[in-house]
Image (tube, rainbow, N blue to C red):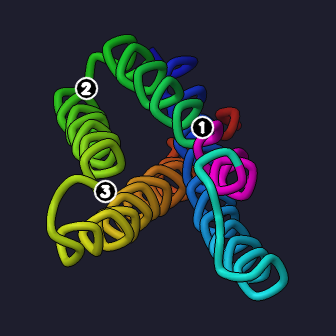
Amino acid sequence: MSAFRAIYRIWVSILTAAVVLQIFFAGAGAFDTADKVSSEGAVVDESSFEDSFGAHIGLGYLIFLGTLVLLLVSFGTRDRKRIYRSLGVVGLLVVQILLAWTGGAVPYFFGGLHPLNAFLILGFLGSITYREWKTKEEGAETAPATVPPAT
């Protein structure tokens, strides 16, 4: 079980870093699209748009797959709290993907929920990561001391 907990701690840290990179890719895609609009005369077709957001879209699906791996690893830890937290992350990612798919087909203000949910995901993963590393440090501090030899 401790091996699964170590894997869980490292994997959730990787996912947290990936979400930060994902937010970077969203900003880069937005500014690339804005640059295309200003330089190409306000016409951005779907292909051009997808070129700008390709890294963001691709990494998003990888993050989702990574959260499924996190859920599987959490089952190995046999800790109910870790399993529930992992289920929560998977749930937020499902919502994120649904918001991305429907963002263009609903009133524009619903599209604003996609980046807000991204920050919820980042906050939740960040809090899990913090908790995992803090628990590791506390476990090291409270480890039983070795008994000195009797004299």
Q: Residues within 10 Å of mark 3 (few under 14, many from 20)?
A: few
- Quarter of the figure that contains the C terminus: top right
Is 57 in the magenta?
yes
Q: Which residue is mark 2?
A: 79
Give the residues drawn in magenta, as a range. Answer: 48-59
Mark 2 and mark 1 lie on one chain; the one further toward the N terminus is: 2
Q: Nearer the viewer, mark 2 or mark 1?
A: 2
Question: Which three-letter amino acid code belongs to the residue tagged 2?
Answer: Asp
Q: Which residue is mark 3?
A: 104
- Quarter of the figure that contains the N terminus: top left
Judged from this view, the residue extending furthest toward the right is 39
In the image, taking residue 47 as reference, residue 79 lies left or right, namely: left
Whether residue 94 is situated above or below residue 42 in the rendered picture: above
Could you tell me residue 5's position as x and y percent? 49, 28
In the image, taking residue 43 as reference, residue 128 lies left or right, namely: left
Q: Residue at x 60, y 65 (%)?
A: 26
Q: Which residue is mark 1?
A: 147
